[in-house]
Amino acid sequence: MAAARRERTKPVRVHLASLGCAKNLVDSERLLARLATAGALVGAEAEEADIILVNTCGFIDPARRESMSVIDEYAALKVERPELKLFVLGCLVVRDGDALRDRLPDVDGFFGIDAHEDIVRASGLADEDTGDTRLLLTPSHTAYLRVADGCDNRCSYCTIPSIRGNFRSRPAGDVVAEARSLAELGVRELNLIGQDTTAYGVDRPGESGIVGLLERLDEIDGVRWIRLLYAHPAHLRDDLVRAYTRIEKLVPYVDLPLQHLSDRILAAMGRRVDRAAIDRLLGTLRGQVPGLALRTTFIVGFPGETDAEFGQLLRGVEEIRFDHLGAFAYSPEPGTPAAELPGRLPPDLVADRLERLLAAQHAVVMEKNRSRVGDTVDVLIDGADETPGISIGRTATQAPDVDPVTLVRGRHKAGVFVRARITGSSDLDLTATVIR
């Protein structure tokens, strides 16, 4: 009888898999904090967990396939352990909830975005709202800081508004308070995220926009780098360009998803800029921001993309010479205007174009890396590499998770900044030696 009582008092062991973007990761961190406050033991291995949570991505077809694969992998554990509970949550549930319930009968619960109270209670725990408290899933010296959620841009290919809703800026006071709390925990790098960070504040009359928010974040002791991600080219104003030259902690890194460089396709995508506007913006940024690094994202194979239009995109990558670039094949998303467009391209053709685009970018980066040999830079150490005697770090122009890294000779403590000289490259990654 005593043994049974002890068994019932054991904490619920939770394992969480967070898929998709940094916005999803922040959702996962907040959920973990809420579960831990309620008494759960979070961070358990899947094989030892009482509850497995899968925070899904539903943005495009490859992400949905990955989510389904992970869910199936965890569902297989229930064959041996039928008492295991499997909860699926996040964007894919919002997007395909009814179909998921039919497809995944072994899942014990489906939850949308921000259904944290329901998840805690379904876990058999007493819920307590923990607000912005998070258990970081990033290294302890770096964190994502969400400034807004949702989107009003309504690009023709994108499902985000139907999943995340309309654009909503967080109150500046809440953002700053969370940033201070993160700094007190030892965070030295803040990466600002939102579906469109450059639109921050437009829905809050009387509050400052993104520049005012950056000015307030710049005053926080302990934070050394602030990086702005997910800037929209139609909303990056002159005052933000100037902010890069005067806000000390704002690193010279601009993440500017352009999606294409053909005027016709940009218009069909609903991007609200054309190639001339893009060229002007890039020229202004490069002319005014010393040491600027540009990151962008492109979609290859949009309906009706001709050889000539893909050629425009390919030549643009070769001529503009982005520092970092991500690209993916167009995915026709049900319910989006682009999915109804004629001119769907053969998958083999799209795959070939994607390969050619990435190869062109690879050549650009390799040449840029060679030109940087001998440069002296500050590197934030993220941890140890698998290679003995090498640490993994990043310069101010390398964002976490999405960009190449800097491999620094020697073992250095995670979270410290070192002064290093670039000595070469290992494929897309830089190599460096600390200056004594």
Image (cartoon, helix red, strand yellow):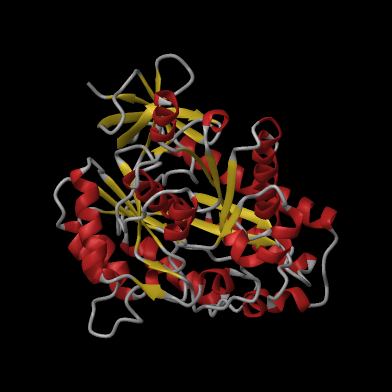
Quarter holding residue 156: bottom right
x and y percentages locating residue 58 in the rendered image:
62, 59
Q: Quadrant of residue 42?
A: top left
Q: What residue lies at 59% left-to-right and 38% top-to-bottom?
A: 84
Residue 431 in sight in this render: no
Q: In this rendered view, identify the residue nearer to me: 228 or 262.
A: 228
Residue farthest toward the top in the current orientation of the protein: 388
The image shows residue 408, relative to residue 377, as above or below, that is above
Say which residue appears at 68% left-offset and 75% top-offset.
Answer: 336
The percent position of residue 178, horizontal first and vertical second, equals 25, 57
Quadrant of the drawing holding the N terminus: top left
Q: Give the camera-side residue of 62 and 275.
A: 62
Q: Quadrant of the C terminus?
A: top left
Q: Is residue 221 shown to the viewer in this render?
A: yes
Q: Give the residue furthest to the front.
A: 1
Is 369 on the left-hand or right-hand side of 86? Answer: left
Q: How many labels does the image show?
A: 0
Q: Is residue 388 left or right of residue 176?
A: right
**Which residue is at the far bottom?**
205
326 relative to 378, above or below: below
Say whether residue 63 is left or right of residue 226: right
Position in image of residue 64 (x %, y %):
67, 54
* Residue 298 position by quadrant: bottom right
